Image: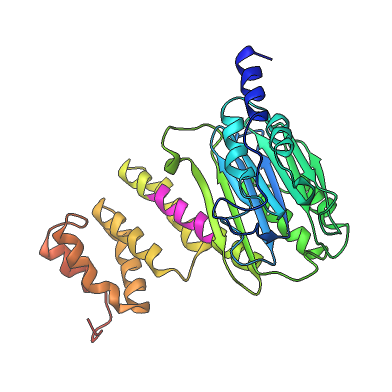
Amino acid sequence: MTLDLLAFLLSAWAMPTLAVVTPTGRPSPLAHTFSIVARDPKTGEMGVAVQSHYFSVGPVVPWAEAGVGAVATQSLVLVDYGPYGLDLMRKGATARQALDSLLAADAHHEGRQVAMVDAKGNVAAFTGPSCIPDAGDVQGEQFSCQANLMANPRIWPAMKAAYENAHGDLAERLMQALEAAERAGGDIRGRQSAAMLVVKGTASGKPWNDIVVNLRVEDHSHPLVELRRLLRLRRAYNLEDQGDNFTAEKKSAEAARAYDEAMKLAPDVVELQFWAAVTMYSNDRKRDALPLFKKVFAREARWVPLVERLSRVGLFPADSTAVATVQAQATKGAPW
């Protein structure tokens, strides 16, 4: 241990005792829930995913920062564990050192359930003896699953097994862990909200560019179904962006594949099709763009006049013939 880290950890013990109320003075929220924190050993991405019978769980439980770590704070929640835990890890503490320091400063830690993973994949978790049963946690390689107020004690082991056997990127594996928890019985009270936060493994210096996934379902009868839908949309829009980049680089085949995959993931999102057509037409792929414009206009005629508006601000060729050619793809008599 370096002298700097030792001094830092000693100072952590001298922090003001964590209060049983949040910084706003309101009582700590009762976010009984199941969650998973994890780091992807291949990409370095870190994330948290959670479902709860609690309104808007997203601002309370999941915390993550690129190049630093991820935290889930739940049960009798003290939200401070999220930002304070990240701050400790940012300054060099491991997940275990950060969690132990915060627990030692918390006079009411018996009711907390907290899990952390740092940027090196070290994991730490705590389930206080006052957490409402069934409650517990289990760890695997660079991840931790934790739950409280569950229908049965099979929930967190089911999450672990699902995560370890899942394929895909970190967000997909986190999603499958949540779905496994729900299948195993979930929260004894039912379900209401869900959230997922995934960040890059290395900080860029621009935190807004370091977020991979940040999705919240505030209130829904089936929050995981909705979270799955939102994750699918997030992937579709990411593919759309990739298609735009490939088009700008004159990589037509790669762009076509990206656009096709985006539209397969979200076939009902007309906007994805419209902007793909705009990008194609503006980059000399008129033969590909015109049928797509026709499909868009047939579904929603409101997009037709937007072509001319885009031409005024440089987002479509400032060419009246081009505008007319595209608008001619609309069904005759369309109300625009």
Q: How far across and down, in percent of the image, does residue 51 sit?
A: 68, 60
* Residue 240 painted magenta: yes
Question: From the image, which quarter does the N terminus lie in?
Answer: top right
Q: Is residue 135 above or below residue 124?
A: below
Q: Is residue 166 above or below residue 320?
A: above
- Residue most extreme to the top: 3
In the image, the segment drawn in magenta is 232-243
- Nearest the viewer among 53 and 214 is 53
Q: Quadrant of residue 71?
A: top right
* Callout count: 0
Q: Quadrant of residue 142?
A: top right
Q: Is residue 81 left or right of residue 245?
A: right
**What residue sits 62% from the left and 33% below the top?**
15
Q: How far across and down, in percent of the image, does residue 62 sit?
A: 61, 50
Could you tell me what secondary structure mostly forms the magenta stretch? Answer: helix
**What residue sits 51% from the left and 62% below the top?**
264
- Nearest the viewer among 103 and 247 is 103
